[in-house]
Amino acid sequence: MGLLYIEGLLAAAVVCYEHRAIPRFTATAAHGVLLLTGCAFGIVTALTPGLAVPQWFAFVMGFGAVHVPAAAILLVKYLRGSGRS
């Protein structure tokens, strides 16, 4: 169970990084789209029957999973030294 909490903390860190980096690299307001999509995915994950983890934890993991691809793209943009697009 300890590893699951580390994964939850990593998911929260990814969300924080991604929302902090969005204004530096994008000209559009992607915050709302990612927040709504993350909430929807988190709710669906939390309502999955037969989970071995608490529902709040499943929500955090689903919410974080949506943010991983965007955070990866923003990290690549940072490493390449890209500007706003």
Image (cartoon, rainbow, N blue to C red):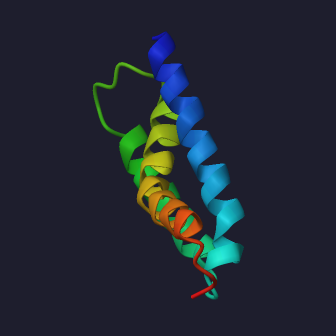
Up the image or down, 54 lies above or below 62; here it is above
Q: Residue furthest front?
A: 80
Q: Residue furthest top?
A: 1
Residue 27 placed where, x, y %?
64, 88
Q: Residue furthest left?
A: 50
Question: Is 17 in front, or is 77?
Answer: 77
Q: Residue at x 62, y 71 (%)?
A: 31
Q: Residue at x 50, y 47 (%)?
A: 64
Q: Residue at x 42, y 48 (%)?
A: 65
- How many numbered discs, if any? 0
Q: Quadrant of the C terminus?
A: bottom right
Q: Residue at x 46, y 58 (%)?
A: 72
Residue 51 placed where, x, y %?
33, 25
Q: Is residue 55 left or right of residue 21?
A: left
Question: Is 57 in front, or is 72?
Answer: 72
Q: Quadrant of the N terminus?
A: top left
Residue 77 placed where, x, y %?
53, 70
Residue 58 placed where, x, y %?
45, 35
Question: Is 33 in front, or is 72?
Answer: 72
Q: Is residue 76 left or right of residue 85?
A: left
Up the image or down, 29 lies above or below 59; here it is below
Q: Quadrant of residue 18?
A: bottom right
Up the image or down, 83 lies above or below 75; here it is below
